[in-house]
């Protein structure tokens, strides 16, 4: 099993603005400018928090965007508004430990899911696109406990206005 974080942040390290909006991202570029399709085709499972799901559930045909993966949303809700997304009400670390070892898992967004996985040394790859945007405040990507974590920089790519950094756990 490999656990991946794949996402875009601002130059000052934010996933979303202070209202959890991604408008800054949508106004900067599109996934067509990145290697998203190749990345997504190698994933078996997506994990996201309720706030990330709330941001994407309004996208037209969102279930077709995540059509080939099993999609789990960590929430207290019993059901979700979009077909193809399964609510999960348990600890993300325990949930991931129960996944078959031959699966690739994408943590779609949210430091609430990423932090405990990092705290437990369960994140194998971090792929970050950096948008040419400064927010000054917002939702930070990293919020794990204070502990040294080392990764190896495998690759640097440029996609339009985005820089992409590809890291693997040492």
Image (cartoon, grey):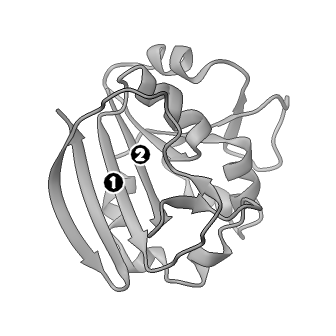
Tell me what residue is drawn at x 54 percent, y 14 percent. 94
Badge 2: few (under 14), some or many (20 or more) residues near its Cα, within 10 Å?
A: many
Badge 1: few (under 14), some or many (20 or more) residues near its Cα, within 10 Å?
A: many
Is 122 in front, or is 65? 122
Is 91 in front, or is 60? 91
Rendered position, 109 above or below 136: above
Q: CA distance from mark 1 to mark 2?
A: 6 Å
According to the image, label 1 marks what residue? 127
Query: Which is more N-terminal, label 2 or label 1?
Result: 2
Quadrant of the rendered image containing residue 23: bottom right
Is 75 in front, or is 32? 75
Tell me what residue is drawn at x 57 percent, y 24 percent. 92
Image position of 7 (left or right of 138): left
According to the image, label 2 marks what residue? 5
Pointers 1 and 2 in contact (C-beta within 8 Å): yes
**Secondary structure beneath label 1:** strand
Figure quadrant of the C terminus: top left
Tell me what residue is drawn at x 31 percent, y 73 percent. 163
Image position of 70 (left or right of 155): right
Is 119 in front, or is 74? 119
Q: Position of residue 103 (x, y in %)?
A: 36, 30
Figure quadrant of the N terminus: top left
**Secondary structure beneath label 2:** strand
Q: Position of residue 24 (x, y in %)?
A: 61, 77
């Amino acid at each position: 099993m490999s656990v991946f974080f794949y996402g875009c942040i601002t130059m000052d390290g934010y996933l979303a603005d202070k209202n959890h909006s991604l408008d800054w991202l949508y106004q900067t570029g599109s996934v067509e400018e990145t290697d998203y399709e190749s990345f997504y085709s190698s994933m078996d499972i997506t994990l996201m928090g309720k706030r990330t799901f709330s941001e994407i559930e309004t996208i037209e045909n969102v279930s077709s965007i995540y059509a080939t993966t099993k999609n789990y949303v960590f929430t207290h809700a019993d059901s979700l508004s979009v077909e193809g997304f399964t609510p999960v009400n348990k600890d993300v670390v325990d949930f991931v430990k129960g996944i078959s070892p031959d699966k690739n898992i994408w943590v779609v967004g949210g430091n609430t899911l990423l932090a405990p996985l990092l705290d437990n040394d369960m994140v194998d790859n971090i792929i970050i696109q950096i948008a040419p945007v400064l927010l000054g405040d917002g939702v930070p990507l990293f919020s794990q406990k204070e502990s040294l974590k080392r990764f190896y920089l495998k690759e640097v790519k440029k996609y339009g206005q985005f820089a992409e950094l590809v890291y693997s756990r040492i």
